[in-house]
Amino acid sequence: MADTLNIAITTLADDVTIPAYAYPGDAGMDLRAIEHVSLKPFERALVSTGLAIAIPEGYAGFVQPRSGLAIKQGVTVLNTPGLIDSHYRGELKVALINLDTEHVFEVQPGDRIAQLVVQKVENVSWTVVDSLDETERGEGGFGSSGVA
């Protein structure tokens, strides 16, 4: 079993569900809405979760789409992944967008709207050099490895 990271969390409203893993070994915990939001086709909204967390330094939270919402409803997280820095202490909100071309999507309080993944992140310092080491890929960018 992997080590467990303990993170302080506070609820900012009544009837808020604390994020939890659905299955052992899952990477993401569901975030739930605490408000009703109606998203017309191609409309976006910032949806409240009623939660604030204290991610420790050296870690970050990443808000990811729920695959079922994306494929079945066309609803996804607009700025995926949404980044929660370790020093942020405000309410977690999820930027949702309805990409369905015809149907309005109704968010109800308690609906699972996104997933939160907490990961260790490294602090980076840069070393300015005259040139970079050579690799097989080199400068090959988008599509450089083909499609098949």
Image (cartoon, rainbow, N blue to C red):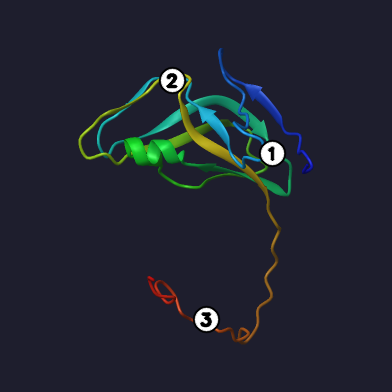
Mark 1 vs 2, N-terminal side: 2
Residue contact between numbered discs 1 and 3, judged by CB atoms under 8 Å:
no
- The residue shown at (67%, 43%) is 86
Mark 3 vs 2, N-terminal side: 2
The image quadrant where one finds the N terminus is top right
Asked where in the image residue 130 lies, by quadrant, the reply is bottom right
Q: As rendered, which of 94 and 69 lies closer to the eye?
A: 69
Compared to 123, does 51 lie above or below? Answer: above
Disc 2 is placed on an element classified as loop
Look at mark 3 in the image and give the residue it sits on: 137
Asked where in the image residue 71 lies, by quadrant, the reply is top left
Look at mark 1 in the image and give the residue it sits on: 55
Q: Mark on residue 67?
A: none
Look at mark 2 in the image and give the residue it sits on: 35
Q: Residue furthest top?
A: 14
Which of discs 3 and 2 lies nearer the camera? The answer is 3
From the top left corner, tell me how far across and down residue 114 is, in percent.
49, 35
Q: Residues within 10 Å of mark 3 (few under 14, many from 20)?
A: few
Kind of residue sitting beneath label 1: Ile
Disc 1 is placed on an element classified as loop
Compared to 143, does 71 lie above or below? Answer: above
Compared to 37, does 121 lie above or below? Answer: below
